[in-house]
Image: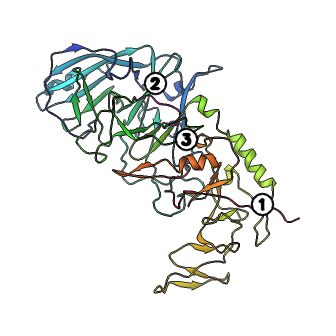
Amino acid sequence: MVLEGSSEALCPPPSLELRPSCNKNQPSPPLGSGSQSHDALCPEDKEPIKYGELIVLGHNGSLASGDKGRRRSRLALYKRPKANGVRPDVIHNVSTPLVSKALSNKSQHSISYTLSRSHSVIVEYTHDPNTDMFQIGRSTESMIDFVVTDTASSGGGGQGQGGANGEGGQSAQSTISRYACRIMCERSAPYTARIYAAGFDCSKNIFLGERAAKWRTSDGLMDGLTTNGVLVMHPAGEFVSEPAPGVWREISVCGNVFALRETRSAQQRGKLVENESNMLQDGSLIDLCGATLLWRTPSGLRHTPTLKQLESLRQELNAARPQCPVGFNTLAFPSLAQRATIDKKQPWVYMNCGHVHGYHKWGFRKEKAGSSAVALTGGGGTAPATTGERECPMCRGVGPYVPLWLGFEGGLYLDAGPPTHAFCPCGHVCSEKTVQGWSQIPLPHGTHAFHAACPFCGTWLTGEQGHIKLIFQGPVD
């Protein structure tokens, strides 16, 4: 795997034995191998130890094509039956033409740093019985535990892509690395999880080419960055009690923390942030330049609703018999199994005011003067050809008019509160605390842009707050 970037003038020392860690900010970072099968992630023990769960943002409960094996929208990491971790052992300075021979031992994990055409540094890794490793990337090879593909976000004011599913599609050319990152978990309490850029390939190697960003650290070891980088943001407070965004940082191959580069793939690395670590905590976000993952701990997940609880909340909403205030027809949120298409009882909302209605065809507004693309509709109004703005018959507010969808991915919730609010402009419904929390979080987009987005579909949030309180009309009888 060749990772592009930049290089610096390096002075190689003689071969030496490494300490257990290449990150001076942590006592013993667990590195590992993803060579075990996906079945090893979920042992048959009655009470398996769960390290945490990874949830891909932009998917409302599952991939649009369905969760299959290692390609899914959510994955729980459990303690493996046998440790598969590795740790740095010995560093070698070799002639570049001899690198392929030095890396020919497929039973030996290693990271190769190509410094020039004539010189390379190879760091060998040895088995670590105290850690488990889980690898994440675009590759479908067996050493990847969690296969992640690009999730396209929707910019501007468009509705959530894929309707209820929020699949968002995939870009023509993926920007996610085949071996994007690895997470190492300590097998003993408190089961600390740490993240590192890059993953080992099928030959158990990580290869940073001559143009890759790499350098020698102050203690004589090696480190580097991947092409598009692995970004991490830890929450500033407790994710479930006081959600507040932290600062986006970049994680190196050895787990050190750096300020962001000027652009995503710039050749010059950012400044080392010595007082921060690569240790994941509840609510940590991991961006792979094409997909963003959320890390939830077992303790954090206890505050979120289960799928069964979300279904109960849906039934409670429908049992209240909300009605369209104009048509007086009863509205009902569709179930998870029926979310692929819009139902005739589907609730719709005017995004500028929050009034919930049934679907109707009136209230279209004319476009600004100078536009001739206005046609009459059977509903008695005028339908603009390029805008979707409608006038609310309750308050005369003009704005987007979209269907409402319940957020079915419980791991994205910050609490188990009632679904009273919706994200703007996509219409995904969840608790007030959840919309308030996510509307504050800037998510990476492209090479250097950041936007708050709906976690259920990836649509960029609009409006002053990015969300709105829903106003339901109860039954008149």
Q: Is residue 164 magenta?
A: no
In this image, 353 relative to 1: left or right? right
Q: Residue 36 has which mark? A: 2
Callout 3 secondary element: loop
Q: Main secondary structure of the magenta part?
A: loop
Q: Quadrant of the C terminus?
A: bottom right
Q: Is residue 302 above or below residue 475?
A: above
- At label 2, the amino acid type is Gln
Q: Which residue is mark 3?
A: 243
Q: Which residues are magenta?
A: 277-284
- Quadrant hosting residue 143: top left
Alpha-carbon distance for marks 1 and 2?
51 Å
Q: Residue at x 28, y 39 (%)?
A: 270
Q: Residue 322 has which mark? A: 1
Callout 2 secondary element: loop
Question: Where in the figure is residue 188, as x and y percent of width and height?
Answer: 51, 15
Question: Where in the figure is residue 248, as x and y percent of width and height?
Answer: 40, 41
Label 1 or label 3, whichever lies nearer to me, is 3
In this image, 303 relative to 258: left or right? right
Q: Residue at x 20, y 22 (%)?
A: 101
- At label 3, the amino acid type is Pro
